[in-house]
Every structure is written in C-alpha cells, then in structure tokens.
Image (tube, grey):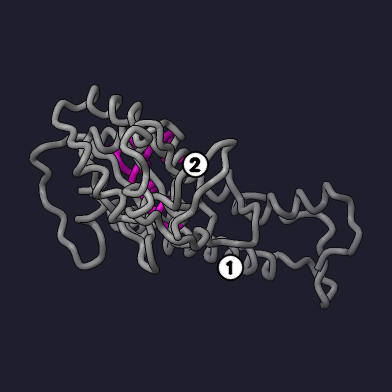
Amino acid sequence: MMEPHADPEIYDAFAGALLSPEADLPAGLSSWTGKEPQRRFGVYRNNVAHSLVSALESRFPVARRIVGEAFFAGLAQAFIRVSPPRSPLLMVYGDTLADFVADFPPAAGVPYLADVLRLEAARGHAYHAADLPVLDPAVLAALPPDALAGVRLVPHPALRLVASTHPVHTVWAMNREGETPQPIADWQGEAVAIARPGLVVETHCLAPGVGVFLGALASGEPLALAAGAAAASDARFDLQAAFGLMLAGGFFAGLAGEGGSTTPAP
C-alpha cells in the first residue's frame, strides 16, 4: 500500500510504473507483510493493463478483427503507455486512439485503420448522446417557400459525420462479426453519417455530394449555401433525395431561430 498524503511526485511515479512494464517498483510502497511488494504490484499492474486493453477491444471490435487479436493487443498496450485514462468512464476511453494509430509505424500497412477507429468511436458517442425528438418534416412543410433557402438546421445530439479518403464504411461493414471480408474493386473515399433517431445507432454511407451537404448543414450553413456547395462538389448531387435521407434518418432535431435559438421538433 502507499502511505496517505504522500508527495504528489510519488503518485506520479506510481502511475508511471503502473503503465510501464519495464519501470522499476515505485518508491514508498509496502505490504502488510513488511516485505517489498514486487509480486503484488506486478499482479496489480497486469490486471490494470488487461482491463484497459479489454476496454479498447470492446469499444473497437471491428478494428480488432481487421488487424487480429495479437496486433491489436500490442497496439492497445502502446497506446495505454502514452495515453492513460483521464476519466473513470472507460466507455469513452480511446477517443484519441485513431490519432495515435495514424502515427503508429507498425500500422502503416493498414492506412484505413485510423478512420475505422474514428467510425467506431463515433458510433459509441452516438449511442450515448442525449435523447431528443427528431425534426418533423411537417415543420419544414409549414414554412413559406421563400424561407427555405435561409433555413438553418440543428443537428441531433447523436449525429456524427466521418469523412475518409478510404472506403471506410465498406471496410467497417464487411469486417463486422458474422460478415466475410471481400476484395474492394473500386477503392474510393466514403463519407459516413451516424445517427440514432430511436434506440438503435444507424450508419449511412453517403454519396460524395451528400457528405458535403451534411457537413455544411451540421456546421450551421443555410440550406441554399449547403446545397450549392454539394452541387459544386458533385454534379450528380440530388437535393431532394439527400434531404429526404436526412429527415428520414433523424439527422436533425430542429430549426435554428433568430439569435441562435432552436425550434425543436414537436
């Protein structure tokens, strides 16, 4: 055990040794037998590392399946050493794992892995987001036609957008449990919308222009400007189909009113 009210540096040393298997036993430790507690501390260190690796495995099952159990465990252990948890809520641990993987040399041969991690993290955040009713299309239908161009929409708290230069949705979908990976003939970037209009998280692969449209709307652009940006990025952009998908998918919670106020769904 560690003496109470110890110097903060001792606690820092303890935490550092806990997450680094090569570190020496931190000073200031004792056991009820009065002997050096190397073995007990080693068991505790292994238990902590195992619990953190297990938390990451649970949160990123598709990424784990892509690279394999052994590789993911090694990746997780390397991440834990440089990014220990800052919160007791392990369900949010690993938000920065994608950024870590992007600069992790052993993962260089799997360039899409970071974006798969971002997609899985986004799905987790969507699941735990606040519950709000989704925007009722009747609210928009009741607006004067000349007012639609300037409408700004309020994203639902569960909405997430992941854009990738890789076919991230296709890779994620074919590597889920029960699926069998197949060759991808047309390797193109994909934008993915994650929403939770009810109790189930839904994942939508978006056409290029639709991804631009949603990104603009989610950042507060009025409808006309967002549609213009989407059409400029993709000549095949279909405004009616894109808007229908977003309303049916529960991407938005209301309209932004004057002064930043919100008109929620009824």
**Residue 47 numbered mark, or none:** 1
Residue 68 visible in the current orientation: no
Give 154 or 2, whichever is nearer the viewer: 154
Where is 236 relative to 178, above or below?
above
Q: Residue at x 58, y 48 (%)?
A: 81
Q: Is residue 1 left or right of residue 75?
A: right
Amino acid type, callout 2: Ala
- In the rendered image, the quadrant that contains the C terminus is bottom left
* Residue 264 coordinates in the image, percent (x, y): 49, 53
**Residue 87 numbered mark, or none:** none
Give 138 or 64, whichever is nearer the viewer: 138
* Residue 138 coordinates in the image, percent (x, y): 34, 54
Q: Main secondary structure of the magenta part?
A: helix
Q: Is residue 31 left or right of residue 22?
A: right
Circle nearer the viewer, 2 or 1: 2
Q: Residue furthest bottom?
A: 33
Q: Residue furthest top?
A: 232
Q: Along the polypeptide, which appears first: circle 2 or circle 1?
A: 1
Mark 1 closeness class: few <14, some 14–19, many ≥20 residues within 10 Å: few
Where is 130 relative to 33, above or below?
above
Query: Separation of disc 2 and disc 1 at Cα?
Result: 49 Å
Q: Residue at x 23, y 33 (%)?
A: 209
Q: Residue furthest front?
A: 144
Query: For the magenta stretch, what is the residue range?
Result: 100-124
Secondary structure of residue under mark 1: helix
In the rendered image, which residue does mark 2 sit on? Answer: 256
* Residue 86 coordinates in the image, percent (x, y): 65, 52
Q: Residue at x 44, y 56 (%)?
A: 265
Amino acid type, callout 1: Asn
